Amino acid sequence: MPEFQKLRVLLEKNYTWPALYLFKFIIPIEKEPEFKRILGLDITIKEYEVRASGKGKYLSFTFRMNMVCSDEVIEVYQRAIAIKGVLSL
C-alpha cells in the first residue's frame, strides 16, 4: 500500500489507537446503494450525515467509526475509492 504511506504516517502521528475516526466522502448520487453496501452503512454505521449537492448530482457522506489501527482506516478508504466517482476528503 505505498500510495497510502503518507496517510499512514499522518494517522500514526496524530492518533492514539483505538480511536474514533471521522470519514468524509463525496459520491455520485447513483452510487449511493453501492457505497452504503460496501461500507456497511445502515448495518454497522447507523449514524451518518448525508447532504445533497446544490444540483443534486452528488451526495456528501460524513460518519465516524471506531478504528483499531491506521490500517483499518486505510482499508475503509480503499473500499470506498474502489467505487467509480467516489472522492475522499
Image: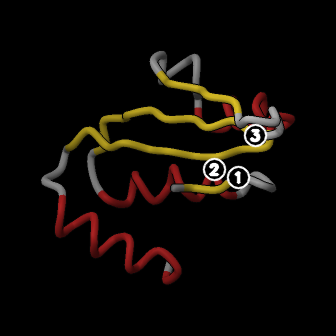
Residue under pointer 2: 80
Q: Earlier in the sequence, mark 3 or mark 2?
A: 3
Residue under pointer 1: 86
Q: Amino acid at mark 1?
A: Val
How was this image coloured?
A: secondary structure
Q: Earlier in the sequence, mark 1 or mark 2?
A: 2
Residue under pointer 3: 58
| 10 Å crowding of disc 1: few (<14), some (14-19), many (20+) | some
The residue depicted at 49 percent of the width and 83 percent of the height is: 2
Tell me the element at label 2: helix
> Position of 8 compared to 18: left or right?
right
Q: Earlier in the sequence, mark 1 or mark 3?
A: 3
Q: Please say if 41 is above or below 76.
A: above
Tell which tag, 1 or 3, sits nearer the viewer.
Answer: 3
- Circles 1 and 2: CB distance less than 8 Å? yes
As measured in the structure, the alpha-carbon distance from the residue carrying label 1 to the one carrying label 2 is 7 Å
Tell me the element at label 3: strand
Q: Amino acid at mark 3?
A: Tyr
The residue depicted at 53 percent of the width and 80 percent of the height is: 3
Q: Please say if 59 is above or below 74.
A: above
As measured in the structure, the alpha-carbon distance from the residue carrying label 1 to the one carrying label 3 is 10 Å
Residue projecting furthest to the right:
30
Residue projecting furthest to the left:
16
Whole-percent x, y for residue 67 in the image: 31, 43
Whole-percent x, y for residue 12 in the image: 21, 67
Image quadrant assignment for residue 81: bottom right
- Circles 3 and 2: CB distance less than 8 Å? no
Q: Amino acid at mark 2?
A: Ala
Whole-percent x, y for residue 30 in the image: 86, 35
